Amino acid sequence: MNKPKMASEKGNSSLLTLLDQIERMNGEAMLRDTEMARHVTAKILHLIQTQEKSGREIMSKGSSGMEVILASLENVTVLNPSITLMLFFCWLMVIGRGHRVEVFVSKGGTGILFQILIAASKESPPSMELMLHLHSLLAKVGPKDRRFGMKARLSGALNVTVSLIRQNLQNTKLLLPCLHVLRVYSSNSVNAMSLGKIEGVELMFKIIGPYSKKNTTLLKVALDALGALLKSKTNARRAVDGGYVAVLLSLYQDWHRNDTRCRHILIRKGLLVCLRNITNIKLGRKAFIDADGMRILHNSSTECLPVRTLDPLVNTSSLIMRKCFPKNRLPLPTMKSAFHFQLPHIPAGGPVAQLYSHPPGVDDVVDDSDDNEEAEADTDTENDEDEKDNYMLNDDIETDLNKLYPKRSLCRPFEELKVYERFFLELSEDFQVIISDEDCNSTKGHETRPSSSALKHIQSPLLLGGIPTLRVGSGGSNFGSDCGSEGADEEGGEGAVLEVPDTARLLPLHNPDLYVEMVKETCSVPRYAEVAYPDYFGHVAPTFKEPLLERLYGVQRSKIFQDIERLIHPNDILDKVVYDLDIPNCPLVKDEGESLKFNSQFESGNLRKAIQVRKYEYDLVLNADINSNHYHQWFYFEVSGMRVGVTYRFNIINCEKSNSQFNYGMQVLMYSVQEAISGRPCWVRTGTDICYYKNYFARSSIAAGGQKGKSYYTLTFSMSFSHKDDVCYFAYHYPYTFSTLKMHLSKLEDLRTPQIYLRQDVLCETLGGNHCPLLTITAMPESKSSNHIYQFRKQLHQHTTLSCTSIPAKTVSPSTYVMEEDEPSFLEAIDYSAESNDEDAEPENELADEAQENLDQLSD
């Protein structure tokens, strides 16, 4: 190190004078004049201890005091331990007071400390006081030096510190700073492996056990160091092989029983962190299960739940238990949908071909191994994360604005686009027959949509019977049955006819009889023989802002612990299948009120299986989309046979998304038939204790797109019903079936006014045989004059296209429901009088050009 020049600095303070004297002394001079060197360093230490400005002066910008002390340390080394100690004291005071460790590191101070450590370890015997203060300074410097671990490994300091700990297990004064340094060493994965090879893990277990409340500060630091060591998978395997998992569990039990005043939470947390790191490997999880760790942590965590200050222990325990919970198979024979539609042509490389190309013996529900084996070799990841962060910075932000603009080139020949001209008849309509209000009804004859009366004569693929009368008592929604009415006939299922609530005033677009006809006309892959009550009755949209549910503290953890109890107390689980769509004679419940009854065999219903796990708890499995083995998130199903005042818990166990709005206050929707009969046909937000979390059901790589180690998620909610023998429906969001869409389009014809241009065309026919409607809505021209017609067609250049998805076997997206509520606003007349002040302008020769320009826009 080049010697700094103190003479060039301004100021004649006593500290600078003393530093200048130290600067002029080299190693040999200090050796010859030991008393002088000791006297000067003692004065420097005294000034730093008594005057705060002295410490600031050494660390101030432009001062070379730091370089002087570093040069003195490098020259003195261990030739004079007393002088070295006083220099160490100077540094401890300066660094502790000024928090300028970064400057010390930048000047190469870490390397000098390691040089002194190695040199001091070669002395026989080494100075314990020197080692004490040296490790104290290293403990301060280590967290601030990013390459501290590598410097320690290359200098050989790891062996020195471990040897010092091994020889001074009873010397707590020296042991504490050594453990601090060892913890910093272990933050580097390569160092952790090296320390494991020299029995660093076994050495830590000698320090932390057996249970004792003496030297709790030392125990905290030792547990931190052990936790850092066990992050290495090699060390974790070494701990498992040594039987230390049971040791950690026993220690945790002792501390849990004896720490009644919760004064040693950090020690208990340190033990849990060690267990958490060990259970990161498969052998560690197995050892944890074999040592009865699930029961130990479950019982202790249950006792800690009421105490908010013990949340860190509960959270870490929950994490360990969920990680170690054995992965279970989803209770299904296959992940493929219960319904299959034979496509006329299946692309060879498409997802449907891949789905049905697996051999018969392949299990697509769970993989052979639910655990991803960890890499055997640990690598030095020092500084790699920072480089990755810098490399991936703003990687997801599109910086090329040219990519954001749509391409304006023709993607199809213009001749092919002419086939769509029939969907834009308003561009060529002369409107000569639509002149006055009394002639407006004649426009309905131009529409391709058949009337509701004509629909009744269409042969239906569904044999639903006549006008529906509904039933409640049996939990179904078949046609030709009653709804929980007393005194119903027992023969032939003919019961008292349910009085359908009169919702015509509230729901102008709804008609129960018309809906039944639309259901008969809808072609669904499952041949449904039932209609859901909400779809038949209709529902009144809420007129208020739906509030968010405020979740009680600790609800999710309590639900997770209840799931863990299934493993600890397996005899308490009923595991009774009450509904299974894969069994022909579904539903399966035939007992008297002991179990709820489920149903989803209606349009948009998608419940596949229901299992009663406890007396009032049910696991529900959703059906995948047709010709698919995933997309489990939305739901729509029916429940009946409930008891009043009983709280039921429902768990939908095969959700796929990693998070949900149900964790942030969203509630499930419920429709009560009894409430509808009473004049309140509404979907309402309900449910308590709503949580969404990862469960222990493994998701196969086939169903996860090739990714292994994935799990499903559980949506759980509790519900207490208000009516006996009620039929209730639960849904993710407001269901909107394809039949409902067709009914609304038919009813719109009756609501049309003379000022509205409304035309419905068939865009195409789906593979299932359903017509895909195309609706054109705008305002009629004010008159037959060429100017008004011209302005009408000119306005069509400013158009809005609304598209939506409507699948007979799936709940439609919320966008479709928005269309239902907002359609009347689209039917308002538009005033074109302000478009032109020239009433005599009659560009008749431009009409054909306007139509041609619209076709040109289609090609764009």
Image (cartoon, rainbow, N blue to C red):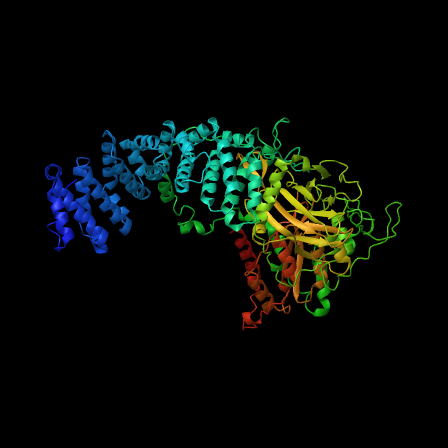
Residue 602 x %, y % = 73, 46
Residue 378 x %, y % = 40, 31
Vertical relation: 232 (above or below) 433: above
Left or right, residue 490 beside residue 89: right
Vertical relation: 284 (above or below) 399: above
> Image quarter for residue 155?
top left
Count of picture labels:
0
Residue 847 x %, y % = 57, 61
Left or right, residue 381 beside residue 346: left
Residue 423 x %, y % = 62, 54
- Which residue occupies the foreground of this view, 743 or 50? 50
| Quarter containing the N terminus | top left
- Which residue occupies the foreground of this view, 101 or 612? 101
Residue 195 visible (yes or no)? yes
> Image quarter for residue 213?
top left
Residue 372 visible (yes or no)? no
- Which residue occupies the foreground of this view, 406 or 821? 821
